């Protein structure tokens, strides 16, 4: 019987920005959104490790090799009057799926949320991504019925800001 891979979850460091950028681009390809992906190592360095970090990132490793990531940031619930943890992206490279890395990343995010006194851990999932939806449901996540994500970006955002 083959030995199970050793799973390690660690915070990203500035030395990981090229790795994280590559994983983000792999996620964009998987989600068929590569045309929208603008992530660069320099932009990630500023947003994750600059003077005012906008997000944090976890790296998931199998046997010492980075195979996934989870990028998250603090949100806030006015109803709970508590912070929340928003998972912006979780991605495990296809050839590493099924080894427990995705679950380990979510477990670490839950630990962070509890340690920080967060009232919730939330994220979006694409409607067509049935494997991810099934995975999340198996961990106890539930879809938020009656809620639709709204977005203003690009020229519309600029026009609204005028």
Image (cartoon, helix red, strand yellow):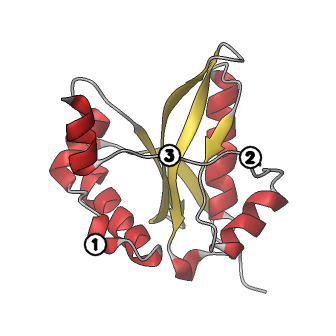
Q: Is residue 150 left or right of residue 123?
A: left
Which residue was labeled with disc 2? 146
In the displayed orientation, state which residue is furthest to the top. 81
> Between residues 97 and 149, which one lies in front from this camera angle?
149
Which residue was labeled with disc 3? 150
Q: Position of residue 99 (x, y in %)?
A: 67, 72
- Which residue is at 83% across, 61% downward? 138
Which residue was labeled with disc 1? 35
Q: Above or below — where is 71 with respect to 61?
A: above
Q: Quadrant of residue 56?
A: top left
Dot 3: few (<14), some (14–19), or many (≥20) neighbours within 10 Å? few
Dot placed on the residue nearer the N-terminal end, 1 or 2:
1
Whether residue 100 can be seen here: yes
Dot 2: few (<14), some (14–19), or many (≥20) neighbours within 10 Å? few
Q: Above or below — where is 92 with respect to 47?
A: below
- Which residue is at 42% across, 77% downward? 32
- Which residue is at 74% across, 46% downward? 146
Q: Is residue 101 left or right of residue 93?
A: right
Q: Position of residue 128 (x, y in %)?
A: 62, 74
């Amino acid at each position: 019987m083959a030995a199970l891979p050793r799973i390690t979850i660690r915070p990203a460091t500035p030395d990981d920005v090229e790795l994280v950028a590559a994983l983000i681009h792999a996620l964009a390809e998987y989600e068929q959104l590569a045309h929208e992906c603008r992530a660069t190592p320099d932009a990630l360095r500023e947003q994750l490790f600059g003077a005012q970090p906008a997000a944090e990132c976890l790296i998931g490793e199998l046997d010492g090799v980075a195979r996934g990531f989870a990028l998250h940031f603090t949100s806030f619930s006015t109803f709970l009057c508590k912070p929340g943890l928003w998972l912006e992206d979780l991605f495990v490279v296809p050839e590493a799926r099924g080894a427990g890395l995705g679950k380990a990343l979510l477990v670490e995010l839950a630990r962070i949320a509890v340690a920080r006194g967060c009232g919730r851990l939330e994220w979006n999932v694409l409607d067509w991504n049935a494997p991810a939806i099934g995975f999340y449901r198996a961990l106890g996540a539930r879809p938020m019925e009656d809620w639709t994500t709204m977005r203003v970006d690009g020229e519309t955002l600029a026009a609204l800001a005028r």
